[in-house]
């Protein structure tokens, strides 16, 4: 999947919104640990691991990856958050979100998941409304 980064900098947190299709889950205990790590490290934490967004309107961005980090920043009352802006379609953003979360939680690629558990893989694709999935998107 070809991706084009538009820019990487800090953006006003109020201009960034969660998406409605994030499949990632984090327990409240893990979220508190993440928030504490960010509180201790400050914004420096995010320079190494910025959130990923896509532009949806002028000065408005939708989160592709990093919703929990964004929520932690909100709760910690930060006004800006480091982000990478991707020039990417909604369909490709959904796939990228799944790829990143899948790899982070299981260590598997989408292709491995499709082969290992085709039923749940196809169920997720139906949920995200991205069937058929093109090979180059894996």
Image: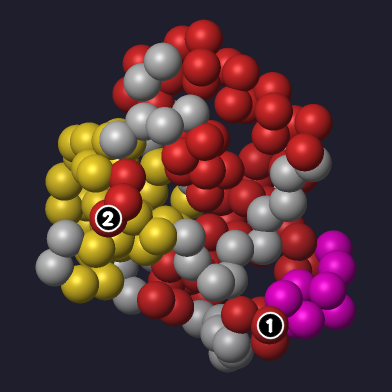
Write the residue at 13% across / 68% down: 58
Q: Earlier in the sequence, mark 1 or mark 2?
A: 2
Q: Residues within 10 Å of mark 2 (few under 14, many from 20)?
A: some
Check disc 2 and report its element: helix, strand or loop: helix
Check disc 1 and report its element: helix, strand or loop: helix
Question: In the rendered image, which residue does mark 1 sit on?
Answer: 127
Q: Are marks 1 and 2 in contact (CB under 8 Å)?
A: no
Can residue 72 be seen from the camera position used here? Answer: yes
Position of 107 with respect to 34 (left or right) is right
Write the residue at 61% across / 18% down: 36
**62, 138: nearer the viewer:** 62
Write the residue at 29% across / 61% down: 61
Write the residue at 36% across / 31% down: 78
Exactly how many numbered labels are in the figure? 2
Position of 90 with respect to 133 (left or right) is left
Question: In the rendered image, which residue does mark 2 sit on?
Answer: 15
Q: Residues within 10 Å of mark 1 (few under 14, many from 20)?
A: few
Residue 55 image point, x, y percent: 24, 65
**24, 118: nearer the viewer:** 24
Relative height, residue 86 to residue 105 (above, below): below
The residue range painted magenta reads 116-124
Question: Where the N terminus falls, by quadrant?
Answer: bottom left
Q: Is residue 119 magenta?
A: yes
Residue 135 image point, x, y percent: 52, 75
Question: Where the C terminus falls, by quadrant?
Answer: bottom right
Measured in 3D between alpha carbons, the distance from the residue under mark 1 to the one under mark 2, in whole angstroms, is 27 Å
């Amino acid at each position: 999947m070809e991706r084009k980064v538009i820019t990487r900098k800090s953006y006003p947190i109020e201009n960034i919104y969660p998406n409605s299709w994030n499949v990632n889950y984090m327990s409240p205990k893990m979220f508190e640990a993440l928030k504490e790590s960010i509180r201790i490290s400050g914004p420096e934490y995010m320079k190494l691991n910025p959130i990923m967004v896509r532009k949806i309107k002028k000065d408005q961005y939708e989160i592709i990856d990093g919703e929990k980090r964004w929520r932690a920043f909100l709760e910690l009352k930060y006004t800006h958050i480091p982000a990478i802006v991707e020039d990417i379609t909604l369909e490709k953003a959904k796939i990228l979100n799944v790829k990143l979360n899948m790899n982070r939680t299981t260590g598997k690629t989408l292709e491995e998941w499709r082969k290992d558990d085709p039923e749940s893989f196809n169920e997720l694709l139906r949920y995200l409304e991205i069937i058929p999935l093109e090979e180059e998107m894996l």
